[in-house]
Amino acid sequence: MKKLLLFDFDGVIVDSLELYEEIARLCLEEIGKPIIKDREDFLSLFDDNFYEAMRQKGVDVGAFNRAVERLIPQVDYTRAGPFFDLIPVLEKLGKENILLIISSNSVAAIKTIISKYRFDQYFKEILGADFMFSKIDKINYALEKWNFSRDETYFIGDTRGDMKEAKMAGVKTVGVTWGWHPRERLEKASADFLFDTPHELLILADSESKK
């Protein structure tokens, strides 16, 4: 049975923790909201929706995104290399399913990286921060546009916040441990699936697969 597979970008497709943290820190300092003091401060923003977490800390997310847009031309996004073990997995999953990217990152940054490493051929659409802030809204949009039921849709993410938003959207949740949040943190979100290697994602190709 064909499925809609929604991939988070940072931490799932690319190893970008250090770069993304650096960008977020610089942009928050630029707008006068230096809320990131250390790595845990940064990662805690992803225990829920990233933008909502910043709002709760008094950040104007519009100003933040404008700062990101100003910084984009100066950033070497290719410093964030992809997880190359995903290539054969994406090739196989993409033959029978629809693959999209849903991310809190900008579409421009995502396209820069995936086109350089030729990951762009596997994804039908990118829904980034430029489109909607809420991953719940992005998931609902994808469901309607691509005409899939919630039971046929899987969100693949690497943070506790990813799992929370996907559950709120009513789709199946897949936590991956090679990204930003460790297994223990993802377990607290009670994901439907929890994978330690990209190869395990092929389990999703089996329509009868269970938790």
Image: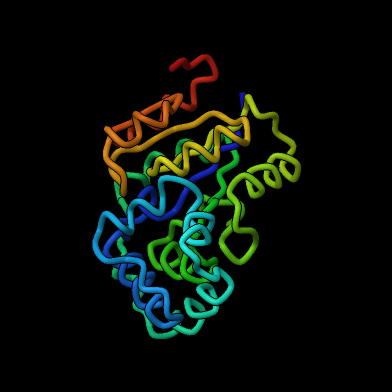
Residue 17 horizontal side relative to residue 133, left or right: left
Residue nearest the viewer, comparing 147 with 2: 147
Who's the residue at 35% across and 56% down the image? 14
Who's the residue at 58% across and 48% down the image? 135
Who's the residue at 31% across and 58% down the image? 41
Residue 184 in the image: above or below residue 59: above
Who's the residue at 61% across and 66% down the image? 130
Which quadrant of the rendered structure holds the C terminus? top left
Quadrant housing residue 62: bottom right
Which quadrant of the rendered structure holds the N terminus? top right
Residue nearest the viewer, comparing 13 with 86: 13
Residue 120: percent from left, percent from top: 50, 58
- Colour scheme employed for the rendering of this structure: rainbow
Q: Which residue reaches farthest left? A: 38
Residue 91: percent from left, percent from top: 45, 42
Taking the image as drawn, is residue 15 in sight? Answer: yes
Residue nearest the viewer, comparing 48 with 149: 48
Quadrant housing residue 34: bottom left
Residue 81: percent from left, percent from top: 30, 61
Residue 86 in the image: above or below residue 52: above
Residue 136: percent from left, percent from top: 62, 44
Residue 91 in the image: above or below residue 195: below
Taking the image as drawn, is residue 198 in sight? Answer: no
Quadrant housing residue 158: top left
Residue 111 in the image: above or below residue 92: below
Give the mark count.
0
Residue nearest the viewer, comparing 76 with 120: 76
